[in-house]
Image (tube, helix red, strand yellow):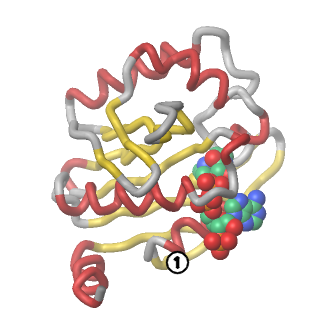
Amino acid sequence: MRVIETERLLLRPVTVEDGDRVEELASDYDVSKTTLNIPYPYPEGGGKEFIESVIESEKNGKIAILAIVDKETQHLLGLINLNIAIPHKRGELGYFIGKPYWGMGYGTEAARAIVAYGFKDLALNKIYAAAFTTNPGSWRIMEKIGLKHEGTHKQHVSRFGEFFDLAYYGLVKEDYLKEANQD
Ligand SMILES: CC(C)(COP(=O)(O)OP(=O)(O)OC[C@H]1O[C@@H](n2cnc3c(N)ncnc32)[C@H](O)[C@@H]1OP(=O)(O)O)[C@@H](O)C(=O)NCCC(=O)NCCS
């Protein structure tokens, strides 16, 4: 997988050496609480184990996952991925940014870049994502990068003993290309 460069970031392939840093950032309760797949408490050594498992999944095309890295410092700020439903050419977008780096536009910058990568390089037909309605940081990213609200599933998931509504956002390739041509 190639490296994607944006104004302030590099999105590069993950390596096992990223494991400890991923663990450091992902083990924060505030990062985990609006996701379904980041465990809390985070198991010791879980970062490395997670990276090893996604590198395996990448080999069969089921996921494209990239480290979000500060171009200047080379520090890993978060992860971003597309989980791919191969028969449908559809990618589900997911991401997290370490809490010290929230609110600086990094999530938006990374998401915009991986959506372009998904349509152009991975030839996906649709990219979608689901966010807890209580997580405006996430659904604002989707709105800002052009994903359209497709509906909200009431009390769709349970997390730490509470039910949450999930807002679904999506974009199909033909609409993405129309929007891109207007720029
Ligand atoms: C969601 C997340 C990725 C946002 O990343 P980020 O880099 O802080 O996002 P950005 O700085 O690009 O901000 C995107 C928009 O959301 C807004 N936003 C960010 N955090 C917000 C918050 N806590 N409350 C309200 N709005 C927020 C920003 O103001 C911005 O909108 P604006 O340009 O209209 O002001 C980050 O908070 C995170 O990793 N959370 C934990 C994991 C998670 O929830 N992942 C998503 C699962 S679907």
Q: Residue at x 60, y 44 (%)?
A: 97
Please state, as top left, top right, bottom left or bottom right, where the C terminus lies in the image: bottom left
Left/right placement of residue 65 relative to residue 25 reads left
Compared with 180, 142 (above or below) is above
Q: Which residue is mark 1?
A: 149
Query: Would residue 82 appear left or right of 124 to someone viewing this image?
Result: right
Indicate the amino acid at tag 1: His
Task: State the image coordinates of residue 72 (x, y, percent, origin top left).
Answer: 47, 39
Relative to 144, residue 88 above or below: above
Task: Evaluate whether residue 163 shows in this view.
Answer: yes
| Point 56% across, 65% down: residue | 141
Residue situated in front as seen by the camera: 124 or 5:
5
Q: Quadrant of the N terminus?
A: top left
Q: Nearer the viewer, residue 154 or 44?
A: 44
Q: What's the residue at 36%, 73% (across, down)?
A: 171
Quarter where residue 178 is shown:
bottom left
Left or right: 138, with 99 as reference point? left
* Residue lying at the far front of the rendered structure: 72
Q: Is residue 85 left or right of residue 81?
A: left
Q: Nearer the viewer, residue 106 or 141?
A: 106
